Amino acid sequence: MPQMRWQEFLRDHHRPHLLEMKLEGALLPKLFGARAKLERLASSLGAVGNYAFKVEARVVYAAFEEEADAERFANVFRPEQTTRDSEWASKTFARMDDATYQRMERVLKSGD
């Protein structure tokens, strides 16, 4: 379940699964800490395939090689919409607000 750099992941994986999370509320100051927590979350949820994260302004992107990994990860964020397009096997949209961040913390504590 190796984590990869974003560009390398996209180069090596055709049409992966994407979760796009918009940060809201008081989370912006926690942005860099959130990325580290996302990496721990992917590991604690037992991701079996490769995955990568990218942070851009107020959006965090998480890409997964395996659909099951993407679904387990997205369920923590209570996704709002999932689509398919030519670039992604699935593309899921979610918000990361304070409640989501707390849910993520609970999942991480239960997995420790």
Image (cartoon, rainbow, N blue to C red):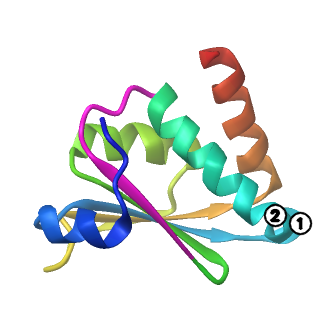
Residue drawn at x 74%, y 64% is 31
Residue corresponding to mark 2:
27
Q: Position of residue 89 (x, y in %)?
A: 17, 63
Residue range in magenta is 45-55
Q: Quadrant of the C terminus?
A: top right
Badge 1 is on which residue? Answer: 26
Q: Residue at x 13, y 80 (%)?
A: 86
Q: Residues within 10 Å of mark 1 (few under 14, many from 20)?
A: few
Q: Looking at this view, name the residue that lies furthest to the bottom.
A: 57
Split into 4 quadrants, where in the image is the N terminus?
Answer: top left
Q: Residues within 10 Å of mark 2 (few under 14, many from 20)?
A: some
Disc number for residue 104: none
Q: Write the residue at 45% across / 42% down.
A: 73
Q: Is residue 72 left or right of residue 27?
A: left
Helix, strand or loop at label 1? It is helix
Residue 88 as seen in the image, left or right of residue 61? left
Q: Which residue type carries mark 1?
A: Ala
Left or right? Give the position of 24 relative to 6.
Answer: right
Residue 42: within the magenta?
no
- Image spot of residue 97 (x, y percent): 76, 59
At 67% from the left and 79% from the top, the residue drawn is 58
Give the amino acid at mark 2: Leu
Q: Position of residue 56 (x, y in %)?
A: 57, 80
Residue in front for this viewpoint, 66 or 12: 12
Q: Are marks 1 and 2 in contact (CB under 8 Å)?
A: yes
The CA distance from mark 1 to mark 2 is 4 Å
Q: Residue 63 appears at what percent x and percent y?
A: 35, 59
**Quarter holding residue 48:** top left
